[in-house]
Image: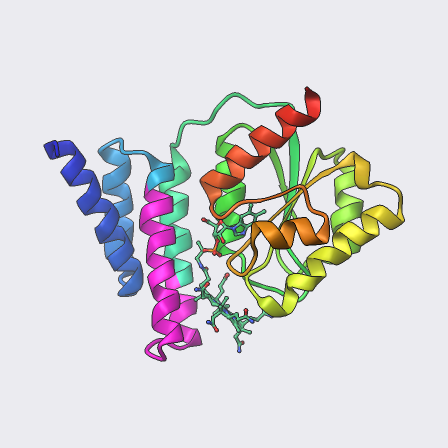
Amino acid sequence: MSRKENQKNLLFTALAQAIIDMEEESATAIAKEIVRADFSSLSAIEIGVSGGMEQVGLLYESGEYFIPDLLVCAEIAETAVSILLENAPKEPLKKACVVIGTVAGDTHDIGKNIVALFLEAAGYQVIDLGKDVSAQRFVEEAVTHHADVIAVSTLMTTTMGNIKDVIDLLVQENKRHLFTVIVGGKPLSEEFAKEIGADGYAECAIGAVRLVNKLLQIKSA
Ligand code: B12
């Protein structure tokens, strides 16, 4: 492994660890170092930030961390993301528009925010509706913005079913054909997406960009 590659891996791992250890100053300094060294911001987010939060999730599940700890980690993760993306190169704006949000009843938004940032960096116009978004609002905003894609996130098994409400409402209002619907979040799967009539599922933010690229090409072909 080259020296540069080694330095990159060390920084990404250190960023994940700083998030896990709730060391804000250190996370900020590492994120700035990654930018200074000109390493890929998107890889740093996927490996350092997402990877760190993944570990935080495990610590919560094992009873070592509690909700207040999660909130601190989440805030540090978001600060790191904003530093990493400050000067990230953006692809020229594509025509397509994505309306994204976390589904009704769910307030988890870190993963959704990362997906939104990746889509934006890939050149999509992204309208972020935030969290706890009702089916009605997803549909209304998609119509208002002439969106091509509706992207719905959820992290909880208890709110998975609410994603189907978005699709059902589209069908009910005879608007299903107007939008490509993609879904994502920890408890979801390809099978679930098929089951509820969504067009696709992706496991991570890079996957989300690939999925939208693929689905829109298929659509316009
Ligand atoms: C951080 C966290 C919180 C934070 C959220 C802060 C925030 N601003 O988001 C806080 C402390 C607020 C929180 C609250 C709660 N939480 Co919580 N939380 C988590 C935790 C530890 C990590 C989630 C996270 O941020 N992961 C990091 C991000 C980067 O990953 P990600 O979200 O999976 O996103 C990636 C992919 O999934 C994908 N993706 C995400 N969205 C989308 C969308 C599309 C379209 C696509 C294509 C892809 C995609 O790409 C992302 C980037 O790669 C998880 C545990 C876990 N392992 O997931 C529990 C977890 C999700 N929480 C859980 C629970 C129960 C709760 C609470 C109900 C707890 C409580 N008793 O109050 C509340 C929820 C209240 C509500 N109604 O929403 C449970 C859910 C269990 C279930 N029913 O399924 C989990 C699984 C923990 C557990 N094992 O019990 N939580």
Residue drawn 52% across the image and 21% down it: 92
Task: Please state the extent of the stretch shown in magenta in the rendering.
Answer: 44-73
* The one of 96 and 193 positioned closer to us in this rendering: 193
Question: Is residue 57 visible from the viewing direction of this image?
Answer: yes
Q: Give the image quarter of residue 53.
A: bottom left
Q: How many marks?
A: 0
Residue drawn 62% across the image and 58% down it: 131
Would residue 42 be counted in the magenta stretch?
no
Residue 166 left/right relative to 48: right
Would residue 53 be counted in the magenta stretch?
yes
* The one of 216 and 44 positioned closer to us in this rendering: 216
Residue 45 image point, x, y percent? 37, 45
Residue drawn 72% across the image and 48% down it: 197
Residue 44 image point, x, y percent? 32, 42
Q: Give the image quarter of residue 98.
A: top right
Residue 103 left/right relative to 59: right
In the picture, the quarter occupied by the N terminus is top left
- Magenta span: chief secondary structure: helix
Residue 132 image point, x, y percent? 66, 61
Residue 148 left/right relative to 40: right
The furthest residue to the left: 3
